[in-house]
Amino acid sequence: MPRPRAGYSINGESVVGVTTVSAQLDWGKSGRLMAWVAKEVRTGKDPFKSRDRAADAGTVAHALIEAHLLDKKPDLSGYDKEVIDKGDTAFLNFLTWCEAYQLKPRSIEEPMVSPKLRCGTTPDLIAFIKDRLSIVDYKTGGAYESSYIELAARKAIWEELHPDEPITGGFHILKVNRDNGAFDHIYRESLDGCLEAFLCLLELYELKSKIKKYL
């Protein structure tokens, strides 16, 4: 199921997405981005073109993975061969990983909205991994503090909506390397403090909405 283009809502009223909530804090990402831009410029590269190629490789990998899980043909029109080859490298590594970890999909890109938290999210994948229900997220490049906060929020929302199907297998982040399309796997059994951080950020988001009336 595709991510909702119109955003998330409850009874016709718009609610915020998990990623928007977590994005309120920079977590040093802008500093790392500026360092990367400087490195690209020093080596004579166009950082914007490099960024777009890296994002495209991640997009291709994501499209290949989603098409495989949904048993459909991927649409790769508009991507050049170099980008497709990088995405394909990540996809082939994903298949090897799936076999090793005995992955069985439960929910693929299912939009979810929490009436309790009044926010929405769309996990990339909820799957049984070695017979334990887990959350899987795809990333191009790095995994930041916000990545783990979002995963913790998705677990809370999933378990609110599926109380008989708790997440018992932890959290898996699958990364596509920006330069060569290589595939990396990060696993965390638990994310202590991350849901608490999300709840604080959600409260901050709601307070900011009230403060805007003074501007």
Image (tube, grey):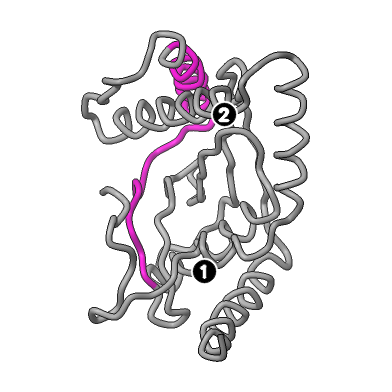
User: What residue sits 56% from the left and 35% below the top?
Assistant: 174
Which corner quadrant of the image does residue 24 belong to? bottom right
User: What residue sits 44% from the left and 71% below the top?
Assistant: 16
**Place of residue 152 in the rendered image (x, y in percent of width and height, measured from the top left):** 59, 62
Return the residue at label 1: 156
Q: Secondary structure at mark 1?
A: helix
Is 111 a magenta residue? yes
Give the amino acid type for the residue marked by disc 2 in the picture. Answer: Phe
**CA distance separating discs 1 and 2:** 36 Å
Q: Please give the range of residues in magenta.
A: 85-113
Q: Eyeballing the image, is 35 above or below 108?
A: above
Q: Residues within 10 Å of mark 1 (few under 14, many from 20)?
A: some
Return the residue at label 2: 48
**Place of residue 89 in the rendered image (x, y in percent of width and height, measured from the top left):** 50, 14
Q: Which mark is residue 123?
A: none
Give the amino acid type for the residue marked by disc 1 in the picture. Answer: Ala
Q: Nearer the viewer, residue 139 or 156?
A: 139
The reply to whether callout 1 and callout 2 are in contact (CB within 8 Å) is no
Q: Residues within 10 Å of mark 2 (few under 14, many from 20)?
A: few
Q: Nearer the viewer, residue 165 or 28?
A: 28
Which corner quadrant of the image does residue 74 belong to? top left
Q: Earlier in the sequence, mark 1 or mark 2?
A: 2
Q: Eyeballing the image, is 67 above or below 181?
A: below
User: What residue sits 41% from the left and 67% below the top?
Assistant: 120
User: What residue sits 77% from the left and 45% below the top?
Assistant: 31
**Place of residue 139 in the rendered image (x, y in percent of width and height, measured from the top left):** 55, 38
